[in-house]
Amino acid sequence: MNTQLNAPTVTLHGLKDELTPDAGRHLLGVVDFTTKSREITIDSSCPRVSVQLATTISDGFSEVWTTARPVTPGRYGEISYAADGEFLFCAFHLPESHTYADATEAAYADALALTSSLGYRPFRIWHYIGSLNDLNADGLEVYRDFCVGRARVLERHGITHDMPAATVIGAHGGGIVCYLLAHRSGTQVNLENPRQVPAYHYPRQYGPKAPNFARATHLATCDGAAFVYVSGTAGILGHATMHEGDVAGQCRLALDNIAHVIGSGNMFAHDIGSCEGHALTDLSTVKIYVRHRADIPVVREICDAAISGTADVAYLNADICRSDLLVEVEGIVAVRPGP
Ligand code: 3EB
């Protein structure tokens, strides 16, 4: 990838690799997918976040975000962040708890207050949640409990739709970890997929408060670069889980859903300037979550055939928001890697 690029770029590294960015690049945020949950630190002047999603150090990895401008780190309440004047990375960690709605509401409110007070707008959000499909102290599934807290904040801010791309995935422990990227002067378009009901319109059967995220976000930055950030995508059509019990069927459908959301028809439908469509082979960084470890080989075979051999691809054994979902795929297309 073009190293002159101002927009944040991401690479995946071994957990023990030295974090030395290329010349002219600066660390904006680091996320370790590792064996233990740890508090967020501010290391090498950017936040370093741990997500408990690896079984051994060798199957873990670090997701390293860099930018072209010097970065200033900071803390705001429970939020750790770093910003370069154009892009911001911020993260929070909520400890394990019997219920999450209130803590989610408070931390999310702080993250939104921080980003907007510094003049940034979120364009991609990740959440990793321990015991995702277990019941909380009130008998509500932890994912649904999280959705209640998120919905309360968004309602308070009058945000009913037009949220950015997101991921919510189970962690092997450690409460809730959330991190997001925000920008100051890019042009952001949140994309839906006409094959899927917008998440904020999911019916009540999936929980008391609907999730709220876009299927993807298109971001054109002022240096002429553009990216499509694809949300965690599963084998869902309309609002229904398809291919129950069939991981291969769900995996193919998840990939079809992504192909549709990044394709030229959907770019045209969302009035993206160039209307330039993309294909699965254009994804450059991909994370693939598989509920049952034993299903990883079959998922790998399907995904490896669809995704470019030069992409950075990580497979993680993780819980997914609905108990009947067996696989979920997220990715990034670097549309124009800059001038
Ligand atoms: C789905 O399509 C699968 O609650 O923010 C994927 C990505 C999913 C993000 C979220 C949920 C979320 O409904 C689950």
Image: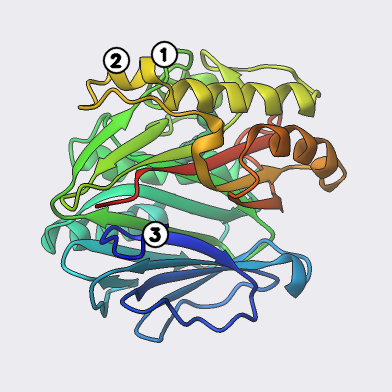
Q: Secondary structure at mark 3?
A: strand
Disc 1 crowd rating (10 Å Cα; few below 14, some 14-19, many 20+) is: some
Q: Is residue 60 left or right of residue 181?
A: right
Marks 3/1 in contact by CB < 8 Å: the verdict is: no
Q: Nearer the viewer, residue 331 or 205?
A: 331
In the image, what residue type sits under mark 2? Ala
Marks 2/3 in contact by CB < 8 Å: the verdict is: no
Q: Nearer the viewer, mark 1 or mark 2?
A: 2
Marks 1/2 in contact by CB < 8 Å: the verdict is: yes
Write the residue at 26% across / 31% down: 162
Q: Earlier in the sequence, mark 3 or mark 1?
A: 3
Q: Which residue is mark 2?
A: 269
Rendered location of residue 64, percent (x, y): 48, 68
In the image, what residue type sits under mark 1? Pro
Write the residue at 28% across / 74% down: 77
Q: Which residue is mark 3?
A: 9
Q: Which mark is residue 107?
A: none
Q: Which mark is residue 194?
A: 1
Q: CA distance from mark 2 to mark 3?
A: 27 Å
